[in-house]
Image (tube, coloured by chain):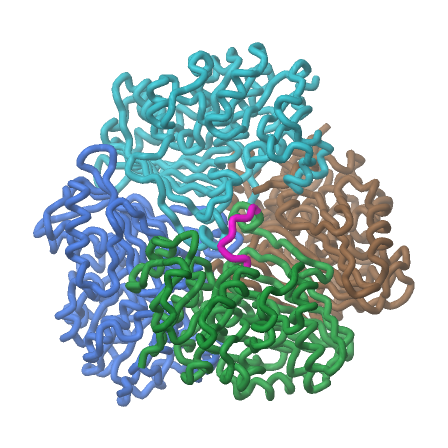
Chain colours: A cyan, B brown, C blue, D green
Amino acid sequence: MTQTIAILGASGYTGAELVRLIATHPSLRAVALSGDRKAGMSMGDVFPHLRHLGLPDLVRIEDIDFAGVDLAFCALPHATSQAVIADLPRDLKVVDLSADFRLRDPADYQKWYGKPHSAPDLQKEAVYGLTEFYREQIRAARLVAGTGCNAAAGQYALRPLISAGVIDLDEIVIDLKAGVSGAGRSLKENLLHAELSGGTHPYSAGGTHRHLGEFDQEFSLLAGRSVRVQFTPHLMPFNRGILVTVYVRGDAAEIHATLAAAYAPEPFLEVLPFGALPSTRSIAGSNYVHVGVIGDRLPGRAVVMVAMDNLAKGSSGQAIQNANLMLGNDETAGLMLAPVFP
Amino acid sequence: MTQTIAILGASGYTGAELVRLIATHPSLRAVALSGDRKAGMSMGDVFPHLRHLGLPDLVRIEDIDFAGVDLAFCALPHATSQAVIADLPRDLKVVDLSADFRLRDPADYQKWYGKPHSAPDLQKEAVYGLTEFYREQIRAARLVAGTGCNAAAGQYALRPLISAGVIDLDEIVIDLKAGVSGAGRSLKENLLHAELSGGTHPYSAGGTHRHLGEFDQEFSLLAGRSVRVQFTPHLMPFNRGILVTVYVRGDAAEIHATLAAAYAPEPFLEVLPFGALPSTRSIAGSNYVHVGVIGDRLPGRAVVMVAMDNLAKGSSGQAIQNANLMLGNDETAGLMLAPVFP
Amino acid sequence: MTQTIAILGASGYTGAELVRLIATHPSLRAVALSGDRKAGMSMGDVFPHLRHLGLPDLVRIEDIDFAGVDLAFCALPHATSQAVIADLPRDLKVVDLSADFRLRDPADYQKWYGKPHSAPDLQKEAVYGLTEFYREQIRAARLVAGTGCNAAAGQYALRPLISAGVIDLDEIVIDLKAGVSGAGRSLKENLLHAELSGGTHPYSAGGTHRHLGEFDQEFSLLAGRSVRVQFTPHLMPFNRGILVTVYVRGDAAEIHATLAAAYAPEPFLEVLPFGALPSTRSIAGSNYVHVGVIGDRLPGRAVVMVAMDNLAKGSSGQAIQNANLMLGNDETAGLMLAPVFP
Amino acid sequence: MTQTIAILGASGYTGAELVRLIATHPSLRAVALSGDRKAGMSMGDVFPHLRHLGLPDLVRIEDIDFAGVDLAFCALPHATSQAVIADLPRDLKVVDLSADFRLRDPADYQKWYGKPHSAPDLQKEAVYGLTEFYREQIRAARLVAGTGCNAAAGQYALRPLISAGVIDLDEIVIDLKAGVSGAGRSLKENLLHAELSGGTHPYSAGGTHRHLGEFDQEFSLLAGRSVRVQFTPHLMPFNRGILVTVYVRGDAAEIHATLAAAYAPEPFLEVLPFGALPSTRSIAGSNYVHVGVIGDRLPGRAVVMVAMDNLAKGSSGQAIQNANLMLGNDETAGLMLAPVFP
């Protein structure tokens, strides 16, 4: 069985990662690729690493015939996505990788993204795409909103702990180290090799990063009360991977046991032995997530660390995992690729 | 159908790469992993990126029961390999990744490796493992010698040109840029991040690199006369990938046409359009090889470039491709993973 | 005027950094260099970047005549240092870069370093070398103990705040990102380029890192009560630089004003405008320290960040700054080199 | 004595490198900095690593009063430079870092840069700035043209050999590995960290790189006949440094002796012992150049390697060295900074 796929926004990094993963997926087949500024080009010219795949050339979205398409991945920039999806056939299954449908409340969207949402009906319809925690809703959904990559990493560290009530909800600090591919293929001075390599650059500190909107929404929903975390991201001189170092209050052994129990049935979530620390190098290129817990010398304090590939599990891998659910496939189909090391 | 595999020397980088590739191979299954110094450890401790795979623990070679093994990959250090393989059951299929069986002539082995070969009978039996050029012999072989990674890259640039007689055999210069994983997981000062990163380091210049033994052997055999190339390798601050820049004399268009024709049927060899230049980033993590040709402003001169992943196509990917042939599998089984970018 | 200098342990990174800085220092001259395992070699063989300097060859410590030496830098491994310094002439000025004399209390030393101190008299004599806070004692000292590089970075963030009483002493979290040169030129698997590059690796988490001994000692001394911070270091894929992200409770504006006032007279400490974030790239290769403060969306919380070159200001630059004081030089002599970027 | 300096184009990498080197120069003082697009900004905002220097803010060129300026460095983009310099006072000493005055012949300029030169009189007046070979002309010059960084590296390898007649002029191949800062602070997709890091990228192959204009001009002038080399540059994943691997025909020992003799009196040119190979890491951040020679196993062939910092000796360091000559300073003033390693 072949399931036909369109990728809108195939000329960016998440688009290319979708193509990479679909290349060895047992049933998905990319039949249409859009890339407005690069329409007319072959994917091999835009991404030489994909040149062997015999892919369709990039076209404009309006030139895609969605009649024969089973599911569309929408890997467009934030804000563009909501307009494009509003114009797609209403029965087309869509997995959106932008930020447009992550926040449920139009007021939250306006607060974090600075303008009103243009498709509030779709916003209402969309299911939040953190697979392990919204599996059944995703299976039944037509429109799934991919999570922020940083937001996913933080939630993997904290959701089971909040649900189980084993940590202090008012004392959560997330210190995040992020690879540069999360910033996309955008021409910004700070993303140049000469600027970024060989050092570390904090950004969006002090509670201003947009993924806090997701943390606020999801953690508060889980806790049944307002939860506000502290969050400091740092841009790192590597291409793939996120490490979150999460400072929490609670019993470290209980925290470890809670996470281990929560993730035991999960195919992609690996809880390391107590005290072992994860590294981004050990998950790069894959859909796997490594979770570590260690206690502190200060009683009642612990650190939870999560390592995840921002492009794979944090974005395009998650999208395919969700698409598998929406299309009735085995959830792990095409996603069992082992991490690439060294 | 499951084919059972032993990996001798699974605690090094080529061993780990074999495990990575076998993880999503449709029929191969790793049933025994050896690692003498690390015997008793789990692969997840030695290589955390493989921890999810449920692999057997590392054992000593002498503790492996080869009765139930269909094929052994031998990823041991040079010189160790010949002793170990001599002790394996004589009907066990073996793909060796070391340098021990690459040179056919005991005198050549002694010249390049500085001591006599201890298993000259096996050396005679071994088939040189450059798949595209020894396919039928490999299919029938019991013992296949994996090529040097640098040697493979240079041969992909030159073999069809030598066969077709379209270049001057006395005017070949190979300038090679190599990622550091080719040096293995060895504790050497020059391989430390603090020493190697951020710069470029030539080594084994002047005609002293051991892979010249393979160039001499293979090119002379092809040409029916002695061929001696000039070869300068440079260690580069990246982990995966080899780029060879090969300076040749001949008609550039003819050179391009010759390579394009030779590699048209090959599943993993991609000849770029004339004038396009390959990059190691476009093949990293995969079994694909990119080949580019450009003419020079000086008439009668051309440059052939080849980009290849030293651990995949240059070593463990090649080994699996050869194992597929030896076991009667589709040659590309398990090897169609797309390159990882960015 | 020339001041003659011996460097004990000149074959490591801090030794080489001393030589680099002394190369353009107006009065210091390196007249003896030791390197036990490399005795007999020229510095140009051990560190080719220093080959133009006409340096003395490496010798064994016992072959140095200290009669003509004004000051010795001791850049030896921890534990070795205390034995060596005990044997030096008692009137020789010494700046030690090891951990051996950082902790004043023999019990603390035993706790963090796992064995009794062998030279408790020297331990008593030694002055803690954080220049800006021990300037007068250093000027009068014979033996100065260089600080831990991580310990220096954390103290630059916190000392003025503790002294001024503007932060909560029980709620301090230091999340540290460290370049790899801090680990020295040691042959460890995790320091290989193939292992370390392209990712981030937490280590010594949970309150086990030895630099906590310095934090405990210094912060408690300042506060007049026991202060215990939480501290998580992460090894980063770059060679030079430390960034500490310090989470504190207090008024952000007051915190910024306190740091700005404290460091206004300091030649090497630059407090950025409120809300500006420092980067390690902006101080690499120099003795400068960048300090940033930002408030959090959560009232009463702030983040202080400090970027510092671990080899320069965190180790060898600090050592020369202290030597300048001990020798009656201008404190900044030889240290005004601007950072190297890009 | 203070010599007042204007830097036109101070917001690029070569401009920042000039400021870095001038920061510890004994007599030069930067009194005016231009940066058209960033006029009005402080240098600390444009380059945070220079924030401690108390520099003048960036202005437009037309707002600089050149009356009080002793010498101007012109670090503007190619083509812009010739127009700007034509409008400067005719008695102002100028060191130009662009490509605009490197080629003496207007026809050559048009050939390599694609349009007619707009200031042919200045082009005639300009002295080629390869200090070691044009020292006396530079001392007397008003306008000096900085060389291409790649062109400098290649000439350091070859000029003495051509002059001495010890190599075959028709058999020269230059394979060049270049750090990315040579491409400037320009927003191009291929210069992004996510694209460039972790791999190697050939470019401008086949005889199309503009620095060939300089090779052709200089080598032919030296030889008294037309000399045409083959030249292939590769962009490398590091920020500073160029390594040229130059394949020549001649007697290796004679080649080494020729270079050693030629550079013996030179303060910045270090010829390594025969057979030793240079690395870019050993000169980064400095004005030093390392030259290595090795013979090949093929009789009559040798490889000459040169490692040089493209921003320092290849551009801004060379410019200051030339300015020192033009202003009557010690040629090495401000340039003796040792390389930064690791």
Left or right, residue A315 beside residue C136: right
> In this view of the protein, which residue sits in the foreground, C57 or A274?
C57
Q: Quadrant of residue B31?
A: top right
Q: Residue C171 placed where, x, y %?
A: 19, 40
Q: Residue at x 78, y 67 (%)?
A: B229
Question: Observer-nearest residue: C113 or D47?
Answer: D47
Does the magenta run of residues contain C65?
A: no
Position in image of residue D221 (x %, y %): 69, 80
The residue shown at (40%, 70%) is D21
Whole-percent x, y for residue C13 in the image: 40, 67
Residue B234: name its quadrant: bottom right
Which segment is the magenta one? Answer: D183-189
Q: In the image, residue B130 lies at what x, y percent?
A: 78, 50
Residue lying at 77% horizontally and 55% vertically, measured from the top left: B157
Residue at the (44%, 21%) spot, across then down: A101
Q: Examine the residues drawn in magenta and state their main secondary structure.
A: loop
Quarter residue B184 falls in: bottom right
Residue A337 vertical placement versus D212 (above, below): above
Quadrant that contains the N terminus of chain A: top right
Number of numbered tags placed on the structure image: 0
**Could one spot residue B209 in this view of the protein?**
no
In the depicted structure, whether residue D338 falls above or below residue D63? below
* Vertical comparison of A111 with D284: above or below: above
Does residue D188 show up magenta in the picture? yes
Is residue C196 visible in this depiction of the protein?
yes
Q: Is residue A235 left or right of residue D235?
A: left
